Amino acid sequence: MLETGGVANSLGNGIVIPFLVIYLHDVRGMGIETAGAVVAVLLGIGVVGSPLAGRVVDHVGARTTLFVSLALLAAGYGGFPFVRGPWLAFALAAVAGAGNAGFAPSHSSLLAALTSGEQRTTAYALTRVTDNLGFGIGGLIGGLIATTQVPESYDLLFAVDAGTFVAFMALLFFVPQPPRTVVVGSGNGYRQVARDRPFVALLVLTAILVTASYAQIATMLPPYVKDNAAVSEAGIGAIFFVNTLVLVLAQLPFAKALSGHNRLRALAAAGAIFSGTCLGVLAVGTWLDGTTAVVFLCAVIIAFSIGECLHGAVNNPLIADLAPPQLIGRYMALRTSAWQVGFLAGPALGSIVLARSSTALWYGAAAMCALAALGFLILERNVTPELAVAPGPERVRRKAFRVRWRTTMPVDDPLSPGAEPAPHQAPSEASHAGEGRRHTA
């Protein structure tokens, strides 16, 4: 149910986000700078909102926070047909941005709580598949619906988008509320998270990797190859279609293959692959052009997609395993913020460097990715083997699934620190979110 709702959410994002600036500029007559600022508010508010949302998750629960986030998204995007001036556009962007800030921490926390350690690698990999598939299909649907020649078509666009969030809200009624964790004493907030040095290091390395790889490929590759390799818009679209196709087809097999393997080394391998792809982009832009450039860029993007599959299969499950159960919301919120910082800093820095030297951009991005890869290998020394190695194949899937679908829990629930396992729950499953989790710096 949760993954099905995730498809609805990513479908709605794909339907609207690529066309929002066009709507505000061409349909509502706002300047391109104003339209861009509205989108910046919508996406950027998560940097400050996600840590707050993580705190809310830990206090009121992941499912409740997710429900409220979806309501804010539905209200924010659903109100855009009524925009007639910038003030309302900014107000609605703030509402939708608040929902966006709460979505990822609550969704990730709920997914972690409803799965065992052995299931998480596959569960988070499936989330990446549904996100990419839903966004791609949503973009196709949005392109078929919206046209500036019929301004009313955008009303339908936003209505469909809001409907996807409402549909997810309906599905949440069939998703059980995970058992609440009793927090005893003080010091269980972000100060405790900040003392988790391996986690803080993982956040920093993630932000570097996102800045230098994901953000540059998503935003700087198109203008670079268009200007330096004479690649058309259709060619750029083909390159990113290949990226989506590889992610949809390969993410789950990679997640399965990584079971029982070292996750920090997988992250290092992803960083090394990203570094090579940055050099590959530079090489294509330097020596090739036209159709030949598109063919070689598709090969480069396949390699990049493999790195994405490695990174996506292990990053979120590792964070979920590092987090104590009473702080899972905060951990997931900071994970979201690390990605958001990368996607805000990446385009800003990339555009400045690209305007001066395209060679410096891709050499610099490659060096940062290589540095991140080295950092993951160093970080391995500070993480216990039980956490560094991904759990092996799930052997008690049906029983774990049945336990997680119970909606009533005793006060002395098995996820509470120091609690004894309930009589009806096997000790081995008593705390899949926290067993043997604490590590040494």
Image: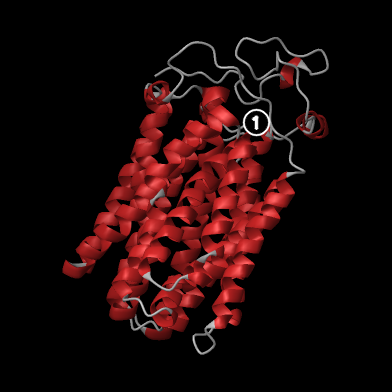
Residue 259 can be seen in this image:
no
Instruction: Tell me which residue sits at (73%, 13%) in the image.
Output: 421
Q: Position of residue 201 (x, y in %)?
A: 36, 32
Instruction: Specify whether 346 is left or right of 46.
Output: left
Instruction: Tell me which residue sits at (37%, 43%) in the image.
Output: 48
Instruction: Specify whether 93 is left or right of 140.
Output: left
Which quarter shows the C terminus?
top left
**Identity of the amino acid at label 1?**
Gly
Front position in the image: 42 or 122: 42
Instruction: Tell me which residue sits at (59%, 59%) in the image.
Output: 10
| Residue sitting at the far bottom | 149
Instruction: Specify whether 406 is left or right of 361.
Output: right
Q: Position of residue 200 (x, y in %)?
A: 38, 31
Residue 344 can be seen in this image:
yes
Q: Position of residue 293 (x, y in %)?
A: 39, 78
Give the residue pinned by disc 1: 117
As helix, strand or loop, the secondary structure at mark 1 comes to helix
Front position in the image: 359 or 63: 63
Q: Position of residue 52 (x, y in %)?
A: 44, 36
Instruction: Tell me which residue sits at (49%, 10%) in the image.
Output: 185
Compared with 270, 429 (above or below) is: above
Q: Quadrant of residue 354?
A: bottom left
Front position in the image: 149 or 221: 149
Compared with 251, 436 (above or below) is: above
